[in-house]
Amino acid sequence: MRNRLFAACNNTMESKDILNIEEKVYTALVNQALSGMPNEVCGYLAEKDGVVIAHYEMRNLDESPEHFTMQPEEQFKAVKDMRQKGLKLRAVYHSHPETPARPSLEDIKLAYDPNLSYVILSLAGEVPDLKSFRIQKGEVSAEDTQIVNNIH
Ligand SMILES: [Zn+2]
């Protein structure tokens, strides 16, 4: 019995490690990243019932192709809006205009919350490449992503 219970718990953990993202949000991220070129763009992803259904574009205060810094006021406003709409902050995203979709050393250093996903959208290749990561104490683990049909 006990083993079965543990197995059930493990399954729950695994299914949490997929980032489901609505197609319209994915498309909006790609458009934001393209229009922000050559600089990195950034923002928050918000989920409802396990699916990312909204994104919050933030200004990149650094205006740089290699770094991003979000504005605390905008971050606060976004989280407040999520609360009002019954959404949950799921991920921090930013674009990599010229490098692969992998966290840089700086990205790893600045990742402050192991409960959030860190999403990187790379425009370095011929087609956009979106990847998601969990970062805990400097350890990076990749997370599956899935583009799903619009449900909202
Ligand atoms: Zn980065």
Image (spheres, grey):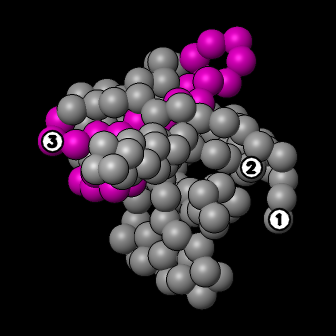
Q: Residue at x 84, y 46 (%)?
A: 149
Determine contact: label 2, label 3, CB under 8 Å.
Answer: no
Decide which of 21, 1 is in the foreground and name it: 1
Which residue is tagged 1?
A: 152
Cα distance in 3D space between marks 1 and 2: 9 Å
Cα distance in 3D space between marks 2 and 3: 29 Å
Judged left or right of residue 86, residue 88 is left
Q: Secondary structure at mark 3?
A: loop
Dot 1 or dot 3: first in sequence order is 3
Asked if the magenta segment contains residue 142, the reply would be no
Q: Residue at x 80, y 50 (%)?
A: 24
Packing grade of label 3 (10 A; few <14, some 14-19, many >=20) is: few
Q: Secondary structure at mark 1?
A: loop
Magenta residues, start to end: 112-138
What label does residue 22 carry, if any? 2
Q: Is mark 1 within 8 Å of ligand 1?
A: no
Packing grade of label 1 (10 A; few <14, some 14-19, many >=20) is: few
The residue under label 3 is which amino acid type? Lys
The residue under label 1 is which amino acid type? His
Q: Secondary structure at mark 2?
A: strand
The residue under label 2 is which amino acid type? Glu
Decide which of 48, 40 is in the foreground and name it: 48
Determine contact: label 1, label 2, CB under 8 Å.
Answer: yes
Which quadrant is home to the C terminus? bottom right
What label does residue 137 carry, if any? 3
Q: Residue at x 74, y 49 (%)?
A: 22
